[in-house]
Image: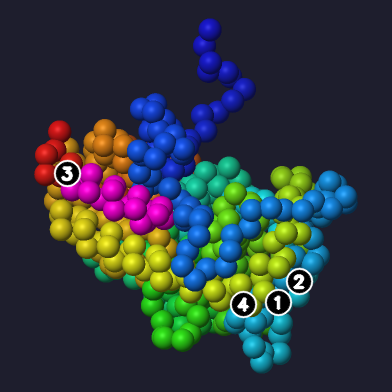
Amino acid sequence: MSDDFHAFRPVPKTGVIFVTTEATKLGFSTTDPEWCNLGQGMPETGDLPGAPARIHDVKIAPDDQEYAPVAGLWELREAVAALYNRLYRKGMPSQYTAENVSISGGGRAALTRAAASLGSINLGHFLPDYTAYEELLDIFKAFTSIPILLEGDKGYSFTSEDLKREILGRGLSALLMSNPCNPTGKLVEGEELERWVSIARELDCTLLLDEFYSHYIYRGRPGVLPVESAARYVKDVDKDPVVIFDGFTKNWRYPGWRITWALGPKSVIERFASAGSFLDGGGSKPLQRAAIPLFEEDYVVKETMAIQKTFRDKRDRTLSRLERIGVRFDRVPDGTFYAWGNVANLPAPLNDGMGLFRAALTKKVIVVPGEFFDVNPGKRRQGRASRFRDYVRFSFGPSLDTVERALTRLEELVANPP
């Protein structure tokens, strides 16, 4: 009997799901310590030096057995708004409130609510960028997705003047991007990010900013919390066309809690809640309640500083060891926990992303081929090889021990290619 049911379309896997599915065929399990998953899109979730104690128990109140509001618990929405006001908006007359926040059960749920709320517009997105954007940009047909290619030999630079040119030239009404970028680690920050927000305000182009890695930033001044957000440069929280997405997944290292949020003008947040009412119905009520104390200033500062120290060290070790075996990097990642490497100079068959991926599996190491970040909604660019086929995303999200063992195996693989 055929399993090609007429009623259903083929649904592609994201890069992370594809590589773990292929690894599972060879015996991979998340509980098997022999495997080193440098393909994972989550950080290590255990204790870090200097970080607050991890949460291992969640109390469930009687009314937590009921549905949470689609937009999230009011107290949690207040806590999110207060965090952004505290980190980025001290002394500014316009402040975020609970009404500027929508809580979702995961990052993709938050982004899906946003995509479902867009009208018949041109929506810009970058190449390369987050692999899950591809299907998200294809499934909703109201808007047209417009790809914008960034060049590796220019360090994936894209200035505020470039932004203005794209908005005016392609008629963009919105732009979706991760900042810092997954997979390149490129960060738009400071005065440049302020200019982006100003142009968005001037030209009425909504910035949809995925800031899930905004606490994994390796640039900054001593004594200053290493975080960045466009929220710092918004003048009026209810008028400026800036929507921010973030959550517990990376910056709090609780991916399994599936607590994320969108932050933006009240009128936009109302639309997201309406979309959520038919898309996902809202997130987990007990976990939302348990999350509220984790927005306290002392907790956020300690967790962020621990992340910065631990992951900067892993970044530096990863880059150094990969460069020694011939992997080339267009830029040192400013943020995230990914190293975006060009493998074209490695011996065959390791000299393209898919070749290295397949060979690394034999050493029980998982990486993600770069072609998955060539965001191509609807496969409109069929019939040509991906421009990122020579790239691989290496995650230094796992523990240092796991990262070091994986790098040793990759060194052995390059020394003795199949």
Q: Is residue 404 magenta?
A: yes
Residue 121 position by quadrant: bottom right
Q: Are marks 2 and 1 in contact (CB under 8 Å)?
A: yes
- Span shown in magenta: 393-412
Q: Secondary structure at mark 1?
A: helix
Residue 258 image position (x, y, % from top left): 63, 51
Residue bearing mark 1:
82
- The residue type indicated by label 1 comes to Ala
> Marks 1 and 3: in contact by CB < 8 Å?
no
Q: Position of residue 222 (x, y in %)?
A: 41, 86
Q: Nearer the viewer, residue 33 or 180?
A: 33
Number of numbered discs overlaid on the protein picture: 4
Q: Which residue is mark 4?
A: 298
Give the residue at mark 3.
412
Residue 218 or residue 364, whichever sits in front: 364
For label 3, count other residues whose C-alpha is less than 10 Å away and answer few (under 14), some (14-19) or many (20+). few
Residue 329 position within the rendered picture, expressed as x and y whole percent measured from the top left: 24, 61
Please indicate whether residue 8 sits to the left or right of residue 292 in the image.
left
Helix, strand or loop under label 3: helix
In this view, the residue farthest toward the top is 1
* Lower position in the chain sequence, tag 3 or tag 4: 4
Query: Nearer the N terminus, badge 3 or badge 2?
Result: 2
- Identify which amino acid the numbered label 4 is placed on: Asp
Would you say 79 lies left or right of 395 here?
A: right
